[in-house]
Image (cartoon, coloured by chain):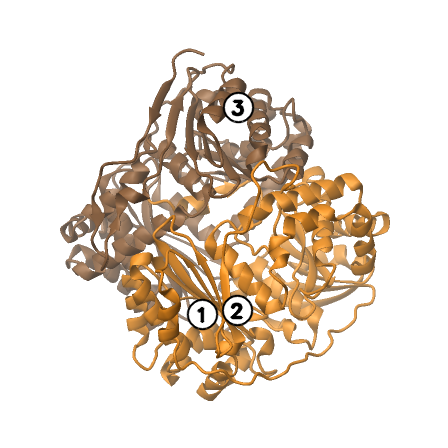
Chain colours: A brown, B orange
Amino acid sequence: MGKLQNLIVLFGIILLTIGALATTIDVAKLRFPVQKTVLPNGLTVLLHEDHSVPTVSYQTWFRVGSKNEEPGFTGIAHLFEHMMFKGAKRYSGKEFDRVLQANGVTNNAFTTYDYTGYFEDLSSSKLELIIDVESDRIENLALTPENLKSEREVVKEERRFRVDNNVAGALQELLWTTAFHTHPYKWPVIGWMPDIDSITLEKCKDFFHTNYSVSNAVVVVAGDIEPDQTLKLIIKYYGKLPKVDVPRPPLPSEPRQAKELIASAQKIVQSDNLAVAYHITKAGDDESYVMDLISNILAEGESSRLHKKFVYDTPWAVDVGGNSSTPQDPGLFEVVAQLKPGVSSKKLAGPLFLEIENLSREMVRPKELEKAKNQIMKHWVDSMKTIHGKAYSLVLNEVVTGNYENLFEDLIRYEKVTKEDILRVAKKYLVKSNRTVVTITPQKGAKNETL
Amino acid sequence: MKLCNRLLWTSAVLVFIACSSKEPATTSPESSSQKTETKSTFQLRHYTAEKWDNGLQVVYIENHNLPSLSFGLLVKGGASRDPMTKSGLANLVAHVMVRGTLKMSANQIADGLGQLGSEFERDVSEDFSWFQVSGLSTSQEGLLGIFSDVLMHPRFDNSELEKEKKLVLASIKQRFDHPDRFVGEAFQSYLFGGHPYARPVSGIERDIKSIKREDLIRGYTKFVRPNNAVLVVTGDFSADISNTLHERFKGWEKRELESYSSSEPPSISGINIRLIDKPDLTQSQIVIGQMGIKRNEPDYLVLRIANNILGGNFSSRLMDRVRVNLGLTYGISSSFDARLDRGPFTISTFTKNQTVGTTINESLGVLRKFYEEGVTSEEVKAAKNYLMGTFPRAIETPERLGYNLALLRLYGISDDYLKDFISNVNMVSADQVNAVIKKHFNAKDLKITVLSKSADSLEQLRPLGLLEVKSFNQVF
């Protein structure tokens, strides 16, 4: 089989502890062993053994997302994800779904800007079956005009469901398409409706051959497995598949935003909805950790600044939430407010921006920073409670940052952030010229309820 | 990097709407035969249970794999026990409880828990309320202190009540902006008529406006009692946890519980359709259903297998016909929401306005064939394997198992349901499944709620059954 790069991560010697809590948590104890192998054909394999339940999570992620699409054919990455469930050679047509269901396997897939992930959660006795099924569809996917025809309609219904008849989805789409002008994050993952209509079978075949090779994939198997035996099985099924060069021309980067961008839409809704975003950094950067903490301080839960200010103290909104989204290329920090009926987004906007941008003027209190670190640490620990969660966290880090080991550095990197870092990064990003503001408001003349 | 990147998830699009694995095993599990299909023998995690003198049931599930723990309390009652003109009361009680105790203000509670990385979760449904805090095990004392204080000594300030009422009233208006959620509540209102399950958990506007502090105190005193609750402690807790709990909950006194019976829901004859007009929609939401079962129905498990074949997984009959073959929808599923009283059986889907009639017709066709011809032994075998195979994941974490054990105590069902789940599913025969289909389904007497632009859908619906039309703001 040729030489394999075999890296085994041993338990770390790092003894750093998170000291914010009364009694400290030993971060080193949160590490778990992972075996990483890159096959000669380029397939990256991550294996993690955990026998606490007789379950395995098997995930295959491809390094392709909507950012790799071309204008006019937006949505093909996602439509193609659907086509991956239409059967291959050894498991053809409806046999694909039938076999998985009849073997007690939970499966699904998702597409994002940067990657497309497929997963199966299964009893450990079904491992070889899943390796067979997954390697079959990478090698022999059947793409037929009939399948494309019906699946296209399914995807259009999905778009109507998630965006066209969904206020939150429509607001998200408006926010990102307004904030980005050059980088492919400017179009939605699900694609524009006319583009979904224009995707041909030939386009799907091209997309498959370009992006769906083992060389462009990461497979993670976590749970009730024997790593050596599992690796042998993976080599048996995937080893014969060819290495393929994946063209990845550089993507146009988003130029620095010069002035505030504003967009709005009207719908038959009961209240104003407002979203504000600031261009920020990308995954893995030091600043991304600072932005996660900023997001937490401002908009995570009932003890956050924005919730207290605008839902509790001056109750203009039903909900205010936020998120620092740092994909592979620079993303957005966003805050979304669902206002109370009768309260105008114009009334909220000024005070909301002031409260957000105040972080660039006043140093955060140490206790508040400590709270944010504790909340993030708790979320991190919660993510590791299931086999699926561990597998997901490993493959996410491998695909997005290039190395799964970054997962284990997270808590250390959050802990290192100081209140001075918060001030510095807030000054850099949370400014008016870097701001995008979008609203969806009740249609004039439409019959809306009044409170 | 942050692991739960909400934005990536919202911009991520799934191939189909997944059944969450967090769903309680009592309402939706799955898997593979223990004897024949799993090499590892599946066993429930070890847990212990006790009952205190004040009637409180306590379940402990110890797990030291991760430095985290949680405290959860299930309180029996829920929205169905709200007085007839006070819908939304249980929900308000749960939310105002965390807005201040005799010792702490609302902000002190939020900040205190926030500092420990936590938050006070509360979730009210038709039959019960669920309260939970969770966090790192180094915070055990702090978490438990606030948790017990909120449960035992809520202040119910008038100002907090008024604030919460305004929030709830705003959310009630905004129901209309969420078609999929709204149609579910609208269907229950249509199905249940004068039965308490007809009312949305968060209540209706005029009831919420009338609720006063005395109502909250009465609702709290009546239901949030130790002899009406199950406490679940999970995770990396300390060895002396039982003593600590006794100390914290000292003085929490039991109270005599009132007996309860509810009215009969209206009977259904033929196909009845309620079209709710919302003129901006390009996609119609559809719920088709009838009365289902109680959770303690002896046929529950066999019905789960039957439902799995009809609309409980990705290769179900409904999915195969309506989504895969016809491309009419992105998602279609059927389910029994089994409750203390008979809950609904529903088929839920959505489609563009132009195909709403076809989608309903096709779905009814699948239901009729299912009822009239029954299912095959191959289908039963596959459904059993699915339920058995997914079962271990439904109770994978101590929290999930704890929540399910609490639910069993609510419904008065033995823990054997979980202990023997795999072997009991394994024993079910195709004949049993076909018998329960004849007994519990009915393919001719159904209620259908459609949320749509009536100008597009009215004429498609007229031939399907007895039709009534309402505006979206006249439903409740």
Looking at the picture, how far across and down is residue A20, in whole percent?
A: 21, 56
Left/right of residue B225 with respect to residue A31 in the rendered view: right
Between label 1 and label 2, give the one nearer the viewer.
1
User: In the image, is residue B370 above or below residue A141?
Assistant: below
User: In the image, is residue B46 above or below residue A405?
Assistant: below
Q: Nearer the viewer, residue B317 or A125?
A: A125
Between label 3 and label 2, give the one nearer the viewer.
3
Question: Which residue shows up at 13% across the image and 51% down it?
Answer: A420
User: Mark 1 touching mark 2, by CB under 8 A?
Assistant: yes
| Disc marking residue B176 | none
Question: Which residue shows up at 64% across the image and 54% down it?
Answer: B284
User: Mark 1 touching mark 3, by CB under 8 A?
Assistant: no
Q: Residue furthest right?
A: B372
| Disc marking residue A448 | 2
User: Gap between marks 1 and 2, in whole Å?
Assistant: 9 Å
Q: Nearer the viewer, residue B418 or B314?
A: B418
Where on the picture, by quarter, is residue A5?
top left
The residue wearing badge 1 is: A341
Which chain does the residue under circle 3 lie in?
A
Closer to the N terminus: mark 1 or mark 3?
A: 3
Residue flagged by tag 2: what amino acid is it?
A: Asn
| Disc marking residue A208 | 3
